[in-house]
Image (cartoon, grey):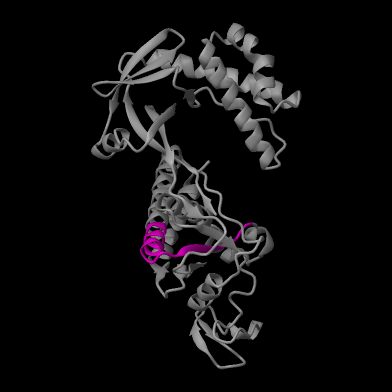
Amino acid sequence: MLMSKTLTRTICIKLDVDGHEATLAATQRAFNAAASWIAQVCWYEGITNTNTAHHRVYGETRLNFGLGAQLAVCARAKAVEAIKAVKARHEETCPQFGPRGSVRYDARTYRLMSLDRVSLNTLDGRVVCRLVLGPRQHAMLIDPAWEIGGADLVWRRGVSYLHVTQSREAPETPEASEPDGGTLGVDLGIVNLATDSDGETFSGAHVTIVRKRYHLRRQRLQTVGTKNAKRRLRKTSGKERRFQRDVNHGISKALVAKAAVSCKAIALEDLTGIRQRVTVRHEHRYVRHAWAFFQLRQFVTYKAAWAGVPAHLVNPKNTSRTCSACGHCEKANRKSQETFLCQRCGFTLNADYNAAINISRKEWAAVNRPMASPLAG
């Protein structure tokens, strides 16, 4: 059986809003005030159905916030989706939106024009802004394989951006059967960020050095506590996040490329809830919990979908204690972080490599669910 999904990607484009700053700012305030009010009404009246919410709030939204018909619809859509997301996380707080939150645009409220311009609907009618496109953004925007969808107007640190979404059908992938090439198992860790069942290791040594440097710098700045120190903290935080994303992008790209070339599926260990299940000493807490393994999983998921590579999560239980040669499982098999030595047959191997082999052999049973990508619908 083959499974086909719709892939979605977002292009972040800087906007030249010269002369329209006040109009766009006023639109953002009204839009987000409306979305916050709609969220409150739907939250306390228990409304999560889109049509029910529309009939309940549409008239009052237009009357009280001065939004046009379609902007009022977009504000309702943003509020209802936020409520559903909060309830899915089992949180008990009604979502609210800041005055400079994003403004959602659909096909009726914005239009891409020639000469890299865009027409946006506002409280004062349509305004035309210039898109500041780089070569890569321009190539993505005109790619005929991708269909242009909605967009979000985002204000970040005094600069306006337009996040344009595009979608296309994903390559068909086997849903429940293993590809002819087998499965590429991936073991995640701290010393080695990832180790695959072919023996390739993505070392975390450089990452550890960089993270430690950022950690010490953050501690010093937090101790100072001045206005300038807080400004530098925000700047440092941005650099650390970008470094983290870059490393995870590199690892996920390499894993998916290898799986695609060798016609293999990808199996990642399911670490959901591990931070709640596993306790560590206070001095080791930062090292254990700071790296974004869920982000790495997301990157592998959507890159695999783009490449037509099946990607699944498997239960990692006992994969680090089981011998990949004879199948004997015992806690004493794991001699150290680095070394695996089977107490029955004497087989020895790098511990992460051994675990990755076991992950690649995990049965694709009902408990081993496909990974849900945030970019696939």
Q: Which residue is pictured at 60% across the width and 80% down the height?
A: 322
Q: Residue at 66% across / 83% down in the picture? A: 330
- Residue 70 on the magenta span: no
Can you give x and y, in whole percent of width and height, for residue 98 in the image? 55, 26
Q: Quadrant of the N terminus?
A: bottom right
Residue lying farthest to the right in this orientation: 45
In the picture, residue 129 is in which quadrant? top left
Residue 30 visible in rendering: no
The verdict on residue 263 being magenta is yes
Using the image, determine if residue 317 lies above or below residue 80: below
- Determine whether 9 is above or below 184 in the image: above
Report the magenta residues as a range. 252-272
Location of residue 288 by image quarter:
bottom right
Relative to 108, say whether 136 is above or below. Answer: below
Residue 109 figure quarter: top left
The total of numbered circles placed on residues is 0
The spot of residue 299 in percent (x, y) is 45, 52
Question: In the image, 332: left or right of 25?
Answer: right
Q: Residue at x 39, y 11 (%)?
A: 126
Q: Nearer the viewer, residue 57 or 259?
A: 259
Q: Is residue 92 visible?
A: yes
176 vs 326, nearest the viewer: 176
Q: Residue 93, how many percent across, how many down?
A: 69, 34
